[in-house]
Structure formats: C-alpha cells, structure tokens
Image (cartoon, helix red, strand yellow):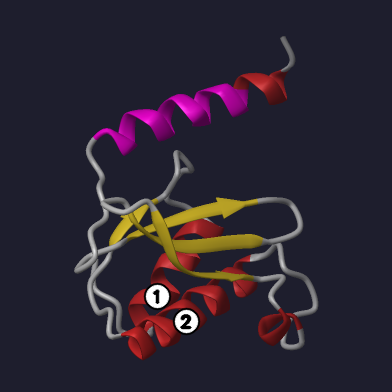
Amino acid sequence: MSKERDKRLARNRRHKRVRKRIFGTAARPRLGVFRSLRGIYAQLVNDETGKTILTVSSLSPELRKKLKYGGNVEAAKLVGKALAEKCKGKGIEQIVFDRSGYLYHGRVKALAEGAREGGLKF
C-alpha cells in the first residue's frame, strides 16, 4: 500500500470514530469540513433529517473573486467568515464542529477561527 492511501484510510477511521459522538440537530447543526488541494469546503447538516442546510467553499463565485488561490489558510479563514454570515441570515448561532478526521491545524483551524470571528459559537 502506498503512503497516500494509508493516510486516507487513517483519516477515514478517525472520521468514523468522531462521527459516532457528533450529531447535528435543527437548533445546533453540524459543520462538516472537507479540504482538497484546490479548495476547502464547509457545509451545515441537520443529521435528524439528513438534509444539508447550507454550503460554502473557496470555489464558490462570491469568494473566488476575492481569492487568488483557494487551497491556503487565508482562503479557509474567508470561508469561515462567509459561513458565519450565511448562518446569521438563517438565524443559526450555535453549531457542532466536525473536523472530518483532519487534524485541528492549518486550514481546518483557520476555517474554525473565521467562523468564530463571524459570531458562531461552538
């Protein structure tokens, strides 16, 4: 097995282990994070109904104009702030943060800090 495959499998194991305990509701939805080399994606999910409430990514048109590159820490922080703005528009103030098995470091941490700066509580 290759090193990249081992890393991916380890992340999936961590993600499954964490998801056993984290659950989003209508009052407090789950913020799921996915990062790729080109961008970072965040979505709010109500796990009771299995519905996605809203999504924001560094590749979305409103953020793409502001960013030179979507796969860095600055882009992640802007995604977090944009997510917080959209949440305020929907009346959501509290969330549950799901880092999806990624380490709380770098882009994932920047997204979380941007969301907190925007007014979300978790």
What kind of residue is marked 2?
Lys
What residue is at 22 percent from the left and 65 percent from the top? 28
In the displayed structure image, the side of residue 84 where residue 6 appears, left or right: right
Q: Write down the residue under mark 2.
A: 81
Q: Is residue 18 one of those drawn in magenta? A: yes
Under mark 1, the amino acid is Ala
Q: Residue at x 56, y 22 (%)?
A: 9
Compared to 22, does 95 lie above or below?
A: below
Residue range in magenta is 7-20
Q: Residue at x 24, y 79 (%)?
A: 93
Residue at which label 1 appears: 115
Q: Where is residue 99 drawn, in percent x and y?
A: 42, 49
Going by the image, does 100 lie left or right of 19? Answer: right
* Prevailing secondary structure of the magenta residues: helix
Query: In which quarter of the view is residue 78 placed?
Result: bottom right
- Is the Cβ of the residue at disc 1 closer than 8 Å to that at disc 2? yes
Mark 2: which secondary structure?
helix
* The quadrant where residue 30 appears: bottom left
Looking at the image, which residue is at 22% across and 38% down? 21
Q: What separation in Å lies between label 1 and label 2 (alpha carbons)?
A: 5 Å
Mark 1: secondary structure: helix
User: Which comes before the other along the chain, label 1 or label 2?
Assistant: 2
Question: In the image, residue 103 lies at what x, y percent?
Answer: 46, 44
Q: Position of residue 15 (x, y in %)?
A: 42, 35
Closer to the camera in the image, 68 or 57: 57
